[in-house]
Image (spheres, rainbow, N blue to C red):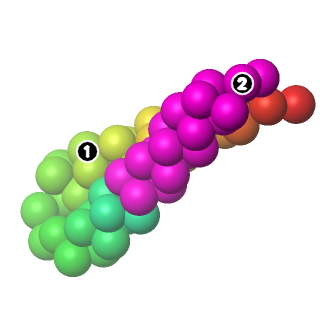
Amino acid sequence: MSPKELIYVEDALSHEQMMQKKCSDLASKLQDQDLRTFVTQLADKHRQTFSEFYSLLN
């Protein structure tokens, strides 16, 4: 993998981690159950995408 490709993958991993954390933090603050469920699902999607990107490195 070239250095440029590695930087791209690192950026993608960092972005997915950040989005997962932001969604999880927001979900914990929401009072509306439907909205909380939706944002929790978004956090799970970002967690899954992170895992998929990470698995490409192995």
Q: Mostly what secondary structure, the magenta segment? A: helix
Query: Could you tell me residue 18's position as x and y percent?
Result: 41, 58
Determine the residue positioned at 68% across, 33% down.
3
Q: Check disc 2 and report the residue beneath it.
A: 2
The label number, if any, that marks residue 38 in the structure image = 1
Assess whether residue 3 is covered by the magenta stretch.
Answer: yes
Whether the residues at callouts 1 and 2 have beta carbons within 8 Å, the answer is: no
Which numbered disc, 1 or 2, marks the residue closer to the eye?
2
Where is residue 7, by image quadrant?
A: top right
Q: Which residues are magenta?
A: 1-19
Circle 1: residue type: Phe
Q: Residues within 10 Å of mark 1 (few under 14, many from 20)?
A: few
Where is residue 41, by image quadrant?
A: top left
Assess whether residue 23 is covered by the magenta stretch.
Answer: no
Determine the residue positioned at 49% across, 38% down.
12
Determine the residue positioned at 59% across, 29% down.
4
**Viewer-nearest residue: 20 or 29:** 20
Would residue 29 be visible to someone looking at this image? yes
